[in-house]
Image (tube, helix red, strand yellow):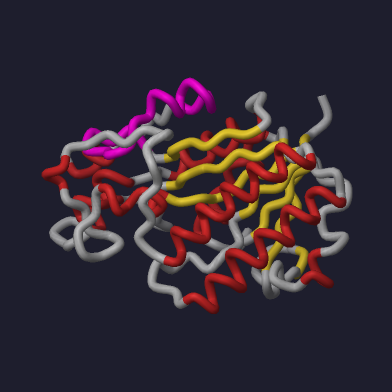
Amino acid sequence: MPSQRVGITGANGTIGRVLMKGLNMEGDCELTPFTRRPVDFPSTIVHFDSAAEVEGAFQNLDAVIHLAADPSPSADWERIRTHNIDAMYLVLEECRRAAVKRLVFASTNHTMHGNSILTTPETLDASTAIRMKLDDPPNPDSYYAVSKLFGENLGKLYSEQHGVEFVGLRIGWLTAGDDPTAFRGTASEDYMRAMFLSHRDCVEAHRCALKVETKFLLAYVISDNDRRVFDLEETAAVLGFEPQDNAEDYFAH
């Protein structure tokens, strides 16, 4: 079977670098990385908020993993509109134009934060002891989260009207060091223990997202954390993703 030709926007980000390494290890993907500026690996320079630059970028790709965005929950509206909303439209338009079969979209756990978060985007109310399901109403905590809900819904429109398969992953908290205990004793410790996503679980979730048979789906992507606030049973059923790591195993040492 020929390799799947996969573009990765935002390839220089933390998740992008993890996927560039992890997806390459299996050899079943031919990766095309996109970045905003020259980096320490070969990449195609594209500003995804520029229609002129996006047009033609996805020619001959089978799928695109769209990570490029302003990732800050504190970002103001102008930044979010430019990098997360306008760019999302241009990315999906290019998928349609270039006949890209599938878009895997980096959504976020922040779309549901209003159900479990106290006063800051990365502080968890551990006393709630809830397990949110995929069909629970969204409750965004920021313009950033609203932009990701926009992306999910625009993806639904393009899957229905233009045949672009869409997999939206509500991603937890992945760090470059792959060690949740870096937040031990901080105000964000409870949040990290609930939302931790290990590197290998992240890679496996995206591998599943590229292969699963679907027209449209959303899924929670976190590790199998004892203190998680997301129900992973539905994700396992619809995406085939079964995480292997657990934040508590790290904190036990």
Q: Is residue 233 magenta?
A: yes
- Give the percent coordinates (x, y) of residue 110: 38, 54
34 to 125, vertically: above or below: below
Residue at left offset 74%, top offset 62%: 90
**Quarter of the figure with the N terminus:** top right
Q: Nearer the viewer, residue 194 or 110?
A: 110
- Give the percent coordinates (x, y) of residue 93: 78, 55
- In the rendered structure, the answer to whether residue 106 lies left or right of residue 53 reads left
**Quarter of the figure with the C terminus:** top left
- In the rendered structure, the answer to whether residue 47 lies left or right of residue 152 reads right
Is residue 253 visible in the rendered image? The answer is no
157 to 45, vertically: above or below: above
Q: Nearer the viewer, residue 19 or 62?
A: 62
Which stretch is magenta? 223-241
- In the rendered structure, the answer to whether residue 249 lies left or right of residue 170 reads left
Chief secondary structure of the magenta span?
Answer: loop
- Give the percent coordinates (x, y) of residue 59: 87, 52
Residue at left offset 48%, top offset 36%: 219
85 to 77, vertically: above or below: above
Residue at left offset 57%, top offset 34%: 217
**Image quarter of residue 227:** top left
Residue at left offset 57%, top offset 39%: 206
141 to 139, vertically: above or below: below
Q: Is residue 126 magenta?
A: no
**Image quarter of residue 43:** bottom right
Is residue 6 visible in the rendered image? The answer is yes
